[in-house]
Image (spheres, rainbow, N blue to C red):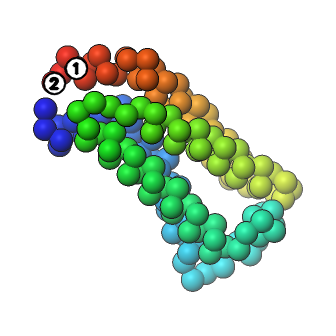
Amino acid sequence: MSVYLRIRHRFGPRLSEWAIATVITLWGVVLLLPADTMEGPSWVVFRELLPEHVWGALMISLGLLRLGGLIVNGARRTITPWIRMVSACVGVVLFIGISAGFGLSGVIGTWIAVYPTFVVVELFNIHRAAHDVGGGDAAATARTT
C-alpha cells in the first residue's frame, strides 16, 4: 500500500486526533498574534504562570509535534500507536490544565463547554491507541496491505 493510501486509510479513524492537534497549534498561533489575547480576567492564571508569547510557542510546538506524529503514524507500513497514545496523554494533561486555569479565574465562559469536552475526546483517543498497541489496528493493516 502506498504512503498516500496508508495515510488516507488511517485519517478517518484518527480524525479527532488530527482535529485536537490542529486546535492546539491554532491556540498557539492566536496567542502569538499582535493582539493581547490574555488581557481579560479569565486569563489571570495563565498570565501568572507564563507570558503570552511563551504560551503561544509552547502550544504551537506541542501541536506540530502531534501533527508530525500523526503523519509518521499514517505513513509507516507498521503503525506507531505509542506516539498517538503519548500525544493523547499529553492532551489530557494539557486540557485539564487549561480547564483548571480558566476555572480558577472564577469567570464563567464558553471554556466550560470546550476544554472539558476535549479531555473526554482525548480519553477516547488514548483508548483507541491502546487498542492499536494491543494489535487491533496492526492486524487490520496487515490484512489490507
Please tell me in which quadrant of the rendered image residue 14 appears: top left
Residue 33 image position (x, y, % from top left):
54, 78
Residue at mark 1 to residue at mark 2: CA–CA distance: 5 Å
Query: Which mark, residue 42?
Result: none
Q: Quadrant of the C terminus?
A: top left
Look at the image and tell me whether residue 121 can be seen.
no
Residue visible at 76% across and 55% down?
102
Query: Which mark, residue 142?
Result: 1
In the rendered structure, are the residues bearing label 1 and label 2 in contact, judged by CB atoms less than 8 Å apart?
yes
**Residue type, numbered disc 2:** Thr
Please tell me in which quadrant of the rendered image residue 89 appears: top right
| Element carrying mark 1 | helix
Residue 66 in the figure: left or right of residue 55: left
The image shows residue 59, relative to residue 99, as above or below, that is: below
Residue 48 in the figure: left or right of residue 11: right
Residue visible at 40% across and 46% down?
69
Q: Quadrant of the N terminus?
A: top left
Residue 4 image position (x, y, % from top left):
17, 43
**Residue that mark 2 sits on:** 145
Residue visible at 18% across and 41% down?
3
**Residue type, numbered disc 1:** Ala
Please tell me in which quadrant of the rendered image residue 36 appears: bottom right
Question: Badge 2: few (under 14), some or many (20 or more) residues near its Cα, within 10 Å?
Answer: few
Residue 100 image position (x, y, % from top left):
78, 49
Look at the image and tell me whether residue 83 can be seen.
yes
Question: Badge 1: few (under 14), some or many (20 or more) residues near its Cα, within 10 Å?
Answer: few
Residue 76 image position (x, y, % from top left):
26, 38
| Element carrying mark 2 | loop
The image shows residue 26, relative to residue 134, as above or below, that is: below
The image shows residue 131, relative to residue 3, as above or below, that is: above
The image shows residue 96, relative to residue 82, as above or below, that is: below
